[in-house]
Amino acid sequence: MSKESIIAIIIGLFVGLLAALLILFGPGLLKNLNLKLPFLKDTEETQVRLGGDLDQADTNGLTGQELVIETPIDGAVFVQSSADILVKGKSEPGAKVVGLSLANQAEATVNKDGIFELELKLLEGKNIIQVVSYNDKTESVQLTIYYAKD
Amino acid sequence: MLRTSLRYLLLTIVFFGLFIVPSAYVSAREATDSATKQEKIELIKGKVASKVAELTKAITVGMEGTIERIEEGILTLDVNGKQKTVNTDDETVISKQNKDLSINKLKFDNLEENDEVVVIGEEQIGTDIINAKLVATAPKIIAFVGEVKEVDSRKFTFILVESEEEYTFDFEKYTDSVGLSGNEFKEVGFSKIEEGAKVQLIASPQKNSETRFTALRIIAL
C-alpha cells in the first residue's frame, strides 16, 4: 500500500468518525447549549396587522359590506371590574355607526378598511346593545350582553 | 499528480461513506424510536390533563329564568324548560333594575316565586348548578330604530315606524334623550323628537299592549 493510500485512509477514518460523532451527539449538544433558531413571534399585534393588510388589499370589495359585530358575541358574559366594553365590527367604509346601550351611547365613522370601534358602558345584569350603521341604507344589529362587577 | 489526487478523493469518499452511512442509520432509527415513545407519553399526559380539567372546569354563564322554588339561599330556576339550581352566598349581589334603569340592592328574602331574574355566575360543566355572582330582576327591554311618523306634544307621545310596523312611545320624565350633532351627543328634550326624524331607542313594553312602550333612552339623529 502506498504512502498516499495510508494518508487517505487515516483522513477518511478521522472525518468519518468526526461526522458520526456529530450525528450521534450533535443534537444533544445543541439542546444543552440551548441554541434556538430565530422565529417570528405570533403576537396579537401581528395578527391584527396581518388582518388589516388583508382587508386593505380588498378595500374595493368592501362596498356594500353588511354590518357585522365581531366582538363581543351575542350572549357574551363579562365579569370584570370595569363596566366599559369595546364593540368592534365591520360595515361599509365611510358609514356613520351609532351604538346605544342602557348606560351611554357612542358614534364612529367606519374606516377605509371597513372597521369601526365603539366604547360602550354596561349596567349590572342583562344589557341590550344596539348598533346602527347609516349610509345609503340603514342596518342595525342588537346584542344581549350579561355583566357582573368583579 | 492528478491521478494521485483522484485516488485521495476516492479513498476519502469510501471511508467517509463507510462510517457515516451506518452511523446515520442507527442514529436516525434511535431518534425516531425515542421521539415516537416521547410523543405517545406526551399525548397520554395531555389527554389525562384535559379530562381532569374538563371534570373540574367551571364556566361563566349568564341566563334568564323564572324562579320556581326558593329555599335557604338556593333558587330553583326554570330556564327555557330546564331546571337550574342557583346557589347564593354573602357575596352574591341581589338587585332590582327599576323602570328608569336605576338599580336598587335587594336581599335574598325580597325574591319571590315566579319572579323573572337574570343570573350571572359560575356553572360547573354538566351539573346545572350555578354559584351566583349576581341575581337581578329587571324590566323587559327592547331596542328600536326607525322614523318618527307622528308626535303628540300634549301627551308626550310619538309614533315610530320600524319595518313598516307602527309603535307608540311614551316620553317620561326619566327618559334620557340625546341628539347627535356632528360627532357630539347633546342632551335634548321632547321637542327635538320631530316628524321624519330618525331615532334609535331602548324601551320597555307596557302592560297589556304589544305596540305601546315606555321610552328609556333615545338618540335623535
Image (cartoon, coloured by chain):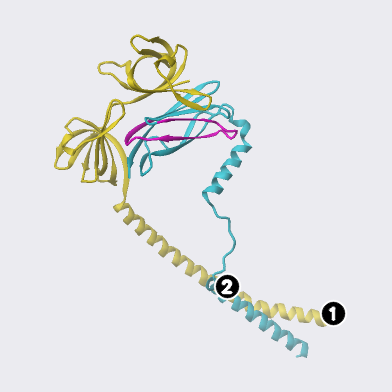
Q: Is residue A18 above or below residue B41?
A: below
Quick check: is A126 in the magenta stretch?
A: yes
Please tell me which residue lies in front, B69 or B99: B99
Which range is magenta? A104-128
Q: x, y (%) of residue A74? A: 39, 34
Q: Is residue A135 left or right of residue B190?
A: right
Q: Residue at x 34, y 35 (%)?
A: A123
Asked if residue B22 can be seen in this view, the reply is no
Tag 1–tag 2 contact (CB < 8 Å): no
Do the residues marked 1 and 2 share a common chain? yes
| Residue at mark 2: chain | B
Q: Which residue is the site of mark 1?
A: B2
Residue type of the residue flagged with mark 1: Leu
Q: Is residue A38 above or below residue B62?
A: below
Q: Is residue B159 above or below residue A46?
A: above
Q: Which chain is yellow?
A: B
Q: Colour of chain A?
A: cyan
Q: Is residue B71 left or right of residue B210?
A: left
- Dot placed on the residue nearer the N-terminal end, 1 or 2: 1
